[in-house]
């Protein structure tokens, strides 16, 4: 999320005039971590009703288990967590999930951060052949770091689908994250406006959720 400082005033003005604003992000970490980033940008977090990230959404669905897809995964399952080694795994606290380093029929890949397709191709083929579902908690295809393009989990998930694997997309442009944001503030799509700079993630996601 990049916001020019000259635009910070507009957030405060919108909030003062009764607008309920929610930050929607494909970030794989929990909402509280994202809100700390908002503070570091110099924004007042109180002008926002909340934050919904891909990671937060995944965590909530695992915790509730009221969605048929997540309920079918069962309790006490192992998962292969694919992430940046220097960033460490995301928190799976109180989710009854356990780490595994090998693809097993009772496990599933959980993708949250940039990876190398070459290093993971064999594992992806093994998981797809065993019909193991994949959950993606960061849907971006690429990101820019130090002026270089890095492969993101969305690319990995698309590759997995081509191999015949099943993927659960937890973020933009899937409408699931937009619906969660609307529930958070208690509004319908007809009373919502989505603001974003990406045709693939922001605009496509808003269109699918029937938000202007």
Image (tube, helix red, strand yellow):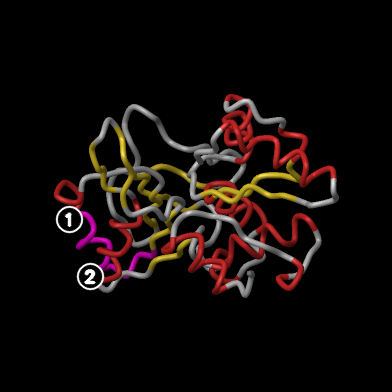
Residue 77 picture location, percent across and down: 47, 53
Q: Quadrant of the C terminus?
A: bottom right
Residue furthest out toward the front: 6
The overriding secondary structure of the stretch rendered in magenta is: helix
Instruction: Tell me which residue sits at (26%, 43%) in the image.
Output: 150
> Is 83 a magenta residue?
no
SS of the residue under disc 1:
helix
The span from disc 1 to disc 2 (Cα, nearest Å) is 10 Å
Instruction: Tell me which residue sits at (40%, 42%) in the image.
Output: 99
The correct choice, above or below, for 50 with respect to 129 in the image is above
Q: Dot 1, how many residues are within 10 Å of its Cα: few (below 14), some (14-19), or many (20+)?
A: some
| Drawn side of residue 95 relative to residue 48, left or right | left
> Is 125 a magenta residue?
yes
Q: Which residue is mark 2?
A: 163
Instruction: Tell me which residue sits at (30%, 64%) in the image.
Output: 158
Residue 64 picture location, percent across and down: 67, 57
The correct choice, above or below, for 23 with respect to 43 in the image is below
| Drawn side of residue 80 relative to residue 148, left or right | right
Residue 74 picture location, percent across and down: 53, 61
Along the polypeptide, which appears first: circle 1 or circle 2?
1
Find residue 137 and name its label: none
Q: Which residue is mark 1?
A: 121
SS of the residue under disc 2:
loop
Residue 65 picture location, percent across and down: 63, 61
In this view, the residue in front, 38 or 15, is 15
Q: Dot 2, how many residues are within 10 Å of its Cα: few (below 14), some (14-19), or many (20+)?
A: some
Instruction: Tell me which residue sits at (57%, 67%) in the image.
Output: 206
Mark 2 and mark 1 in contact (Cβ < 8 Å)?
A: no
In this view, the residue in front, 134 or 150, is 150
- Residue stretch rendered in magenta on the structure: 123-133
């Amino acid at each position: 999320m990049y916001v020019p400082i000259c635009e910070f005033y507009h957030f405060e003005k919108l909030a003062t005039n009764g607008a309920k604003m929610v930050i929607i992000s494909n970030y794989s970490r929990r909402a509280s971590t994202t809100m700390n980033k908002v503070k570091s940008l110099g924004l007042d977090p109180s002008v926002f009703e909340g934050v919904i990230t891909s990671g937060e959404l995944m965590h909530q669905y695992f915790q509730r288990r009221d969605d048929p897809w997540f309920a079918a995964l069962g309790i006490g399952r192992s998962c292969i967590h694919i992430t940046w080694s220097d960033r460490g795994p995301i928190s799976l606290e109180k989710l009854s999930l356990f780490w595994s380093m090998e693809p097993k029929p009772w496990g599933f890949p959980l993708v949250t951060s940039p990876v190398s397709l070459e290093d993971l191709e064999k594992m992806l083929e093994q998981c797809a052949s065993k019909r193991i579902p994949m959950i993606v908690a960061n849907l971006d295809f690429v990101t820019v770091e130090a002026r270089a393009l890095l492969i993101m989990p969305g690319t990995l998930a698309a590759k997995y689908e081509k191999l015949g694997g099943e993927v659960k997309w937890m973020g933009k442009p899937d409408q699931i994250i937009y619906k969660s944001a609307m529930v958070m503030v208690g509004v319908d799509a007809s009373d919502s406006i989505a603001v974003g700079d990406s045709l693939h993630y922001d605009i496509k996601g808003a269109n699918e959720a029937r938000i202007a």
